[in-house]
Amino acid sequence: MGQDSENDVTLVIWTDLALLPDGQTTANTVVSPIRDEIYAGLTLAS
C-alpha cells in the first residue's frame, strides 16, 4: 500500500507472497507499470 497525500492518491496492490522465477516479489513487479500510468510523464525512483 502506498499513499500520496499531496495528490490524494492511495494505491493498494493485492497479491500472494510467492516469488516470481527471477526472485522478485509479485507486488513490486505489478506496481511499477501501474504507478507509471498514474504518474505518467514523471520519473519516479523505485
Image (tube, rainbow, N blue to C red):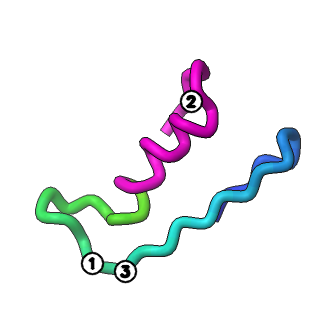
Image location of residue 38, percent across then percent down = 61, 39
For badge 3, the amino acid type reads: Asp
At x 20%, y 65%, the residue is 20
Q: Which residues are magenta?
A: 29-46
Task: Name the image quarter holding the N terminus.
Answer: bottom right
Asked if residue 18 lies left or right of residue 27, the reply is left
Query: Label 1, label 2: how many angstroms apart (C-alpha)?
Result: 26 Å
At x 85%, y 48%, the residue is 8
In the image, residue 27 above or below residue 39: below
At x 87%, y 40%, the residue is 6
* Label 1 SS: loop
Query: Label 1, label 3: how many angstroms apart (C-alpha)?
Result: 6 Å
Assess whether residue 41 is covered by the magenta stretch: yes
Residue 44, numbered label: 2
Asked if residue 31 lies left or right of residue 42, the reply is left
Query: Label 3, label 2: how many angstroms apart (C-alpha)?
Result: 25 Å
Query: Mark 1 — residue?
Result: 18
In the image, residue 41 above or below residue 21: above
In the image, residue 38 above or below residue 10: above
Asked if residue 16 lies left or right of residue 4, the reply is left
Query: Mark 3 — residue?
Result: 16
Image location of residue 46, percent across then percent down = 49, 39
Image location of residue 18, percent across then percent down = 27, 78
Q: Are marks 1 and 3 in contact (CB under 8 Å)?
A: yes
In front here: 36 or 25? 36
Circle nearer the N terminus (1, 2): 1
* Label 2 SS: loop
For badge 2, the amino acid type reads: Leu
